[in-house]
Image: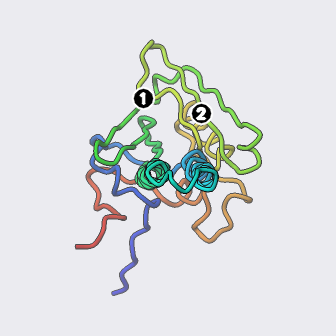
Amino acid sequence: MTTIAPRRGPDGTFLVGKYLLPAERVIIIQRRHYAAMAIPLAALFGGFVVALFLDIALPTSSAGARDLIWLAWSATCFYLGGSLLSWWFSRFVITNKRLMLVHGIVMRQVDMMPMGKVTDMRYERSVPGRLLGFGAFIMESAGKDQALSRVAYISRPDWLYREICTMLFTPDLVAIAPADDDDGSGSGPGAFRVSWAGFGPDDADPDAPSM
């Protein structure tokens, strides 16, 4: 008897499975764009240039000042490391019921907005975003206080914007990715909407690490 291997879900589903409600299914899940690391990287390299300049400019008798300068620069290394870990373990999640941003390392946080509460969504792409391929979503709801109002550094923003709009305005219609997003290999950004039914809390986690 031939056994067909189950379809793998999107990368990182095991990070959010514990937050799903009964019968809720993950439709799209993705890590934010690598451009989110621009500020920590700029702080690291910019701080290095400043520290090196001060190290050269200070007189030879200022050994203590030099140590303080390089100690201050080392803080940017920890800042970059923490930002990298936070980026790696964060996920923007779209289920059949809500939008979620799961983030944090030591203290995990889940910001969410139910699909039915989204009254307006603005889509922004700056000049760097258009060049590098990221955008931002700004969501509004009927309530004043919103746990999830802005999600920056969205990867594949044009495609994701169309997918969210499809779920908001035609929830009974399964959106099919355009040809340039799905090359037929099953690994394109639209493949999971076509051939993957989603991941729910009652299912065996397709991405859970093997014990």
Extreme residue in the bottom direction: 1
Q: Residue at x 63, y 39 (%)?
A: 161
Looking at the image, which is closer to me, 173 or 91? 91
Q: Which residue is mark 1?
A: 114
Q: Position of residue 146 (x, y in %)?
A: 43, 21
Residue 33 visible here: no
Q: Position of residue 141 (x, y in %)?
A: 49, 19
Element type where label 1 sits in the image = strand
Q: Residue at x 65, y 53 (%)?
A: 177
Note whether 170 is above or below 147 in the view shown.
below
Q: Are marks 1 and 2 in contact (CB under 8 Å)?
A: no
Label 1 CA crowd tier, 10 Å (few <14, some 14–19, many 20+): some
Q: Residue at x 59, y 22 (%)?
A: 120
Q: Amino acid at mark 2?
A: Phe
Which of the 4 image quadrants contains residue 45?
A: bottom right
Q: Amino acid at mark 1?
A: Pro
Extreme residue in the left direction: 211
Lower sequence index among marks 1 and 2: 1
Q: Is residue 15 left or right of residue 29?
A: left
Label for residue 137?
Answer: 2
Extreme residue in the front direction: 61
Label 2 CA crowd tier, 10 Å (few <14, some 14–19, many 20+): some
User: If the image is split into quadrants, where does the N terminus sit?
Assistant: bottom left
Label for residue 131?
Answer: none
User: If the image is split into quadrants, where does the C terminus sit?
Assistant: bottom left
Note whether 152 is above or below 83 in the view shown.
above
Looking at the image, which is closer to me, 96 or 19? 19
Element type where label 2 sits in the image = strand
